[in-house]
Image (spheres, rainbow, N blue to C red):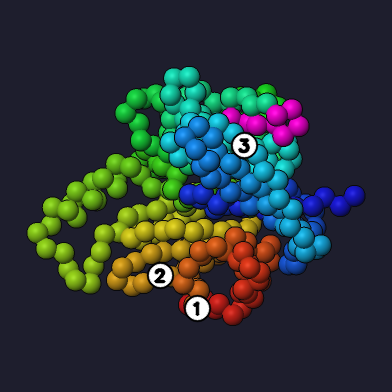
Amino acid sequence: MKKRKYILLIALSVVMLTGCKTSETKSELSDYYLSMTNSSRINENEISVENHTYDFEKDKMDTEKYKMSLTAKYSLAVYDNKGKAVLYSAKDTNGNDEVYRYDLKTKKSEQLTENLWGINYIVPREKDYIVVGVPQIPHDSKVLMLWSIDRNTKEVRNIEIPHDKYKDISVWQVAYVPETDGIILQTYSDSETYELQDKWNSMEEHPKDKEFTNPFYYYQYVNGEMKYLFEKDMPQSMGIIANKNDILFAVQSEIDGNDVFRYNIKDNKVDKVKELETLEKVFYLDEESKNVYRFNGKIGPMSRFSTS
């Protein structure tokens, strides 16, 4: 039986891809289905989780609803298709936000982490769950670190993000790459950001054609190896998608407006993508970098959005 990929989107503070690796290479989505998870507050104690699964080939949408206890400051829930479970954030007995797994068959929850207090991403992969969160120790830490939770052993380990100069690299955005079961990371240094902000704020007058920018560092994590890719200064970034060859990321600027850039991993080159100003609601760049997809269907082909 053909192994089908799935694409998981989180309709919360983040949007990401996730899926199962396949040996097939197609530009169409006939072997994919879209899974979107929405979390909303019912009352002070409960959260409603709706998982919508859309089959591209059958053109059919199915919806399942679950109720869970609401304790986390910022609720985050992700549907795990392989494990038939929902991964979510909730406070433990000590009042810290941790990762929990809710089994849809047994209707029982289990706590997976015990050393976090802030969780921004949960990404189900083939053998583990990738988590972005702040550790409890040291107590003054604000670094959004990368973690792996083994599916079988439940072992939690920190994944180091190396940098030549800074040791406090925080993860800002994550893009899952279904065809490699890897991830792309957009990161920054906490200390560098604070230093640059202090310098900018101490200026008596800012040039009219200038705005605060911050270096973002991009990494590729696949097959257990972390690889530094490139650096780009930008005012702000919101939106990133990727396949094994290319990364698309959005840049927000009050002066220059919004733009989308494309980084080719093989050529190590960044180009501006013409006629594509945002990645809002854009969830997928196909494996051959030919088509771009939004929630409401294909908006490509990429040839329409030439680079400069």
Disc 2 secondary structure class: loop
Q: Which numbered disc, 2 or 3, marks the residue closer to the eye?
A: 3
> Do tag 1 and tag 3 residues touch (Cβ < 8 Å)?
no
Q: Which residue type does callout 2 highlight?
A: Asn
Outermost residue to the front: 43
Q: Which mark is residue 220?
A: none
Q: Quick one: label 1 or label 2, which is nearer the N terminus?
A: 2
Outermost residue to the left: 204
Frontmost residue, 125 versus 86: 86
Frontmost residue, 229 versus 32: 32
Q: Which mark is residue 67?
A: 3
Q: Residue at x 68, y 62 (%)?
A: 287
Determine which residue is flagged by label 2: 258
Q: Can residue 289 be spotted in the picture? A: no
Q: Which residue type does callout 3 highlight?
A: Lys
Residue 212, quarter of the rendered image: bottom left
How many other residues sit within 10 Å of disc 2, few (<14), some (14-19) or many (≥20)? Answer: some
How many other residues sit within 10 Å of disc 1, few (<14), some (14-19) or many (≥20)? Answer: few
Q: Residue at x 74, y 27 (%)?
A: 106
Give the x, y percent position of residue 276. Answer: 50, 74
Q: CA distance from mark 1 to mark 3?
A: 42 Å
Q: Can residue 232 be spotted in the picture? A: yes
Q: Which residue type does callout 1 highlight?
A: Glu
